[in-house]
């Protein structure tokens, strides 16, 4: 299979990739330390590619502070656009396949049907715009690439909605949670497993793909499931988006159509609540 290098190894998806790599006993995969993984340091990037001669490059590095990006558009653009261009150039030079993780936020999310890879992109916040700019650069340099859009990512690692709800649910008697934004939670362990399935496929079909868990829910119902499964007694109050003001506008409907990835890679994708049960078991057992 050849060497694999991973950027963004300290993030929640990077940590899940490490866990799945250990579980599957995957050899020749390198989770790069910060000194080698700055996607804006072209000299360090070149040295990394020269050292590892990677067959695959997995890019989980991103500026993901959605609200902060509204005040720091150039900082977000540096990582989400220019960093991706730097990696794409080197992947072209070293004949490396790039697997780049992107987001449902490249869509406006104003419809009511699951979003396919061919649907029109129209981001409504800076984060989504800069991620889309990065996406668009990849095919300019590469034929061998996978762009993997996902949504509502959570895991036992890092900071995410599930861990926030667990903390707030134990600290506060009442929580106001948005009910009119609909999407699909994605367990980062499932996404990490999917990434390795793509890499290990003997006949890769390159391009853009969507991956999230199966089903759909609102943030309110997602939170209610977290509290119920964790036996946390807290009052959850449903509120409209208009009542919960944030700096960045969020898509109202972010359900991704996974038909393409399921067909091309023979994937069976877990239902979101089943994966939530697994994640909460690990969190609540301290594993």
Image (cartoon, rainbow, N blue to C red):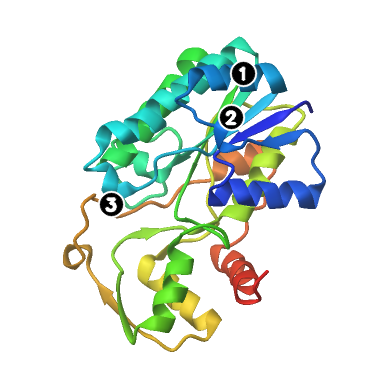
- Dot 3 lies on which element? loop
Q: Residue furthest top?
A: 93
Q: Secondary structure at mark 1?
A: helix
Residue sitting at x 54%, y 46%? 211
Q: Residues within 10 Å of mark 1 (few under 14, many from 20)?
A: few
| Distance from the alpha carbon under mark 1 to that under mark 2 | 8 Å
Give the percent coordinates (x, y) of residue 108.
Answer: 28, 43
Estimate the spatial distance between the alpha carbons at disc 2 and disc 3, rounded to whole Å. Answer: 33 Å
Query: Who's the residue at 47% across and 59% down the image?
Result: 159
Q: Is residue 282 above or below residue 216?
A: below
Describe the element under mark 2 as helix, strand or loop: helix
**Quadrant of the image containing the N terminus:** top right
Compare marks 1 and 2 and give the one earlier in the sequence. Answer: 2
Residue 220 lies, in percent from the top left, at 36, 71
- Is 255 situated left or right of 55 in this image? left
Residue under label 3: 250
Residues at marks 1 and 2 touching, judged by CB atoms closer than 8 Å: yes
Q: Residue 277: image x %, image y %?
A: 60, 72
Residue holding disc 2: 36
């Amino acid at each position: 299979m050849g060497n694999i290098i991973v950027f963004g190894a300290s993030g929640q998806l990077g940590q899940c990739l490490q866990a799945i790599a250990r579980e599957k006993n995957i050899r020749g995969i390198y989770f790069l330390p910060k000194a080698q993984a700055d996607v804006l340091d072209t000299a360090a990037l070149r040295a990394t590619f020269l050292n590892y001669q990677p067959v695959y490059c997995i890019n989980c590095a991103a500026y993901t502070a959605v609200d902060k990006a509204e005040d720091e558009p150039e900082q977000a653009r540096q990582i989400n656009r220019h960093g991706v261009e730097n990696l794409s150039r080197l992947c072209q030079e070293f004949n490396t396949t790039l697997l780049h993780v992107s987001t449902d936020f490249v869509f406006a999310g104003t419809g009511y049907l699951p979003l396919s890879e061919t649907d029109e992109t129209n981001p409504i916040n800076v984060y989504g715009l800069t991620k889309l700019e990065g996406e668009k650069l990849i095919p300019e340099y590469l034929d061998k690439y996978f762009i993997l859009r996902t949504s509502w990512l959570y895991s036992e690692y890092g900071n995410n909605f599930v861990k926030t709800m667990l903390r707030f649910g134990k600290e506060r008697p009442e929580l106001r949670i948005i009910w009119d934004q609909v999407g699909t939670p994605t367990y980062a362990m499932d996404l990490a497993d999917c990434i390795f399935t793509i890499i290990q496929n003997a006949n890769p079909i390159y391009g853009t793909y969507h991956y999230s868990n199966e089903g759909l829910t609102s943030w309110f119902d997602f939170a209610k499931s977290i509290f119920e499964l964790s036996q946390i007694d807290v009052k959850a109050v449903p509120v409209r988006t208009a009542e919960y003001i944030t700096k960045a506008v969020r898509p109202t409907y972010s359900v991704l159509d996974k038909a393409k990835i399921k067909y091309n890679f023979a994937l069976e994708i877990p239902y979101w609540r089943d994966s939530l049960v697994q994640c909460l078991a690990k969190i609540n057992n301290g594993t």
